[in-house]
Amino acid sequence: MHYTDLNDFLARGSAHLGKGPIALIFAEDEVEIETTIRHHQQTGFAQIVVFLRPYFSLPPDLSEQVIRVDYDMTRPAALTRAVNGVIEIAAGRWLYYCYNAEYLFFPFCETRTVSEMLAFHTEERRDAMLTYVVDLYASDLEKDPLAVDLDDAWMDRSGYYAAARKDPLNKNHPKERQLDFFGGLRWRFEEHVPADRRKIDRIALFRAKPGLRLREDHTFDNEEYNTYACPWHNNLTAAIASFRTAKALKINPGSSFDIQTFQWHNSVPFEWNSRQLLDLGLMESGQWF
């Protein structure tokens, strides 16, 4: 199904969303759009909606399998405008959002589907799931000037940390069960990253509710959605393996010429499986075994 713009999709698209969790993929450029879609198909999303410019192409088979929405991601607040619009037409449904060249991983995703995971998460009375954006990068930037290479993907095995999330309404106490997470390329090259874009946490999986709003910092106006766990025990978390930061650092003229390599002593090959991310503490299974 093809919609000519966001308003067209919001007016007519609810009838084509079907049942099950929905993935919203936002293409900022043409890098790895196809692999991003196919990865999330294999993950088990019932429907995938791709937001991309009219002149971006998709393989014929994918064009028949996904919902395409012509959309300009360069406009201000493009992501939040689209996600918040979909929330209004998909109340009660689980939604997920990511950019192109980003890939969702969750505990045991090699043998279990995202629907199975979200069914368990729902039973634990959770309406949102914390995800960590784990930066990926190519090792040879002369061979891969955009730092994107799925066959030669690397990641940081350490350098991740969390800080208490400040409450502007109560400066003496941080927000309950909320943390700001940092690490990866945004931490190592922070001089090239604006302070308000250095966090790597994202509430990327959530249940849509009327009136719910995603904010520009990837948190929601419902504070319980922003928590990493319920009050009584730890919950599932997931990870998004992402080339987005590496790509941006190499595209941006202000940082591109200052970075000759992303490799350092804590770089390790990315193994494209959930076990590596679990072992590194970049997601956890909670009570799900």
Image (cartoon, grey):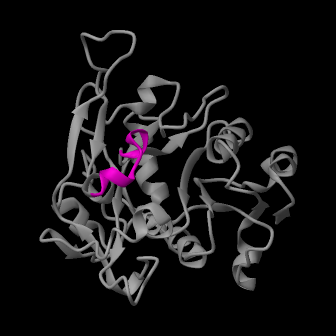
Q: Residue at x 34, y 63 (%)?
A: 135
Quadrant in which the N terminus is drawn: bottom right
Image x and y of residue 276, in percent: 22, 68
Can residue 274 be seen in the rendering of this structure?
yes
Q: Residue at x 62, y 59 (%)?
A: 26
Image x and y of residue 113, in percent: 45, 63
Image x and y of residue 218, in percent: 48, 40
Above or below 219: residue 242 = below
Q: Quadrant of residue 111?
A: bottom left
Q: Quadrant of residue 30?
A: bottom right
Q: Is residue 149 left or right of residue 163?
A: right
The residues colored magenta run: 189-198
- Judge whether residue 193 is colored magenta: yes
Taking depth in this image into account, of 83 and 66 the one nearest to the observer is: 83
Image x and y of residue 84, in percent: 66, 38
- Judge whether residue 209 is colored magenta: no
Above or below 220: residue 108 = below
Q: Residue at x 69, y 78 (%)?
A: 62
Q: How many marks do you count on the picture?
A: 0
Taking depth in this image into account, of 268 and 50 the one nearest to the observer is: 268
Above or below 57: residue 202 = above
- Report the magenta stretch's main SS: helix
Q: Is residue 40 left or right of residue 178?
A: right
Taking depth in this image into account, of 251 and 127 the one nearest to the observer is: 251
Can residue 246 be seen in the rendering of this structure?
no
Q: Quadrant of residue 110?
A: bottom left
Above or below 108: residue 163 = above
Q: Residue at x 74, y 57 (%)?
A: 72
Q: Is residue 246 left or right of residue 91?
A: left
Quadrant in which the C terminus is drawn: bottom left
Q: Residue furthest toward the bottom?
A: 143
